[in-house]
Image (cartoon, helix red, strand yellow):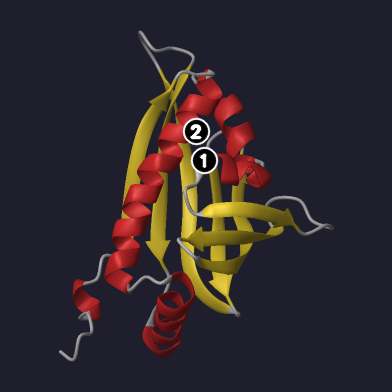
Amino acid sequence: MNGQIDASLRTRELTASITIAAPPEKVFGALSDVRRMPEWSPECVEVWVMPGRSAPGLFFIGFNRNGARRWATLCRVTKSEAPREFTFRVSVLGLPVALWGFRIYPVHGADQGSAQVVQYWKDLRRGRRGRITDLLGQVGAGTSPAARVLTNRLGMTATLYQLKRSLEGSS
């Protein structure tokens, strides 16, 4: 197949979850402050929030790194429903890349006052424009579509673990 991945076999969605000993409102407050994402994400190093809008509709620029490679993405908050869900759509040069989101569920029983956090990723790269975005990802971020899935899976786990540490006050 000339080194290309069959698009029909490509992983297009991922989820990861964790329980955090913090109320859903606290978790949502942290996640919806997108400027804090570099505290948790292994790839995001800085966020600039564009003035003039509130969520949903808020635009921000995410500055990312993978080793020596650096790139920026334009993101738009698409859902901000406290304390249940926060999502944003990512694009590069006007091309859709992904939808990232967090669903937050209260935990009942012994862990009352805790939240189950589910992070999800949906690949939006499709068709001819998707192939262009794939190429930009390989050149800019240094990851093929298959490597991007692994990078995101590992990054989601790291992000949720660091979020947990941050909100529970662990060192």
The answer to whether residue 3 is above or below residue 81 is: below
Q: Quadrant of the N terminus?
A: bottom left
Q: Which residue is mark 2?
A: 163
Assign a secondary structure to mark 2: helix
Q: Quadrant of residue 166?
A: top right
Q: Residue at x 48, y 50 (%)?
A: 101
Q: CA distance from mark 1 to mark 2?
A: 6 Å
Q: Which residue lies most toward the top here?
A: 110
**Residue drawn 40% across the image and 90% down it:** 128
The amino acid type, in three-letter code, at marker 1 is Trp
Residue wearing tag 1: 40
Q: Secondary structure at mark 1?
A: helix
* Residue 118 position in % (x across, y down): 40, 39
The type of residue carrying mark 2 is Leu
Q: Position of residue 26 (x, y in %)?
A: 60, 25
The mark nearer the N terminus, 1 or 2, is 1
| In front of the other: 81 or 33 | 33
Q: Residues within 10 Å of mark 2 (few under 14, many from 20)?
A: many
For the question of whether residue 63 can be seen, the reply is: yes
Residue 23 visible (yes or no): no
Q: Residue furthest left?
A: 1
How packed mark 1 is, by other alpha carbons closer than 10 Å (few <14, some 14-19, many 20 or more), is: many
Taking the spot 67% from the left edge, 46% from the top edge, the residue there is 35
In contact (CB < 8 Å): disc 1 and disc 2: yes
In the image as oriented, which residue stretches furthest toward the right?
52
Q: Residue at x 64, y 53 (%)?
A: 46
Q: Position of residue 117 (x, y in %)?
A: 43, 34
Q: Nearer the viewer, residue 109 or 136?
A: 136
Q: Using the rendered view, name the quadrant where residue 39 is placed.
A: top right
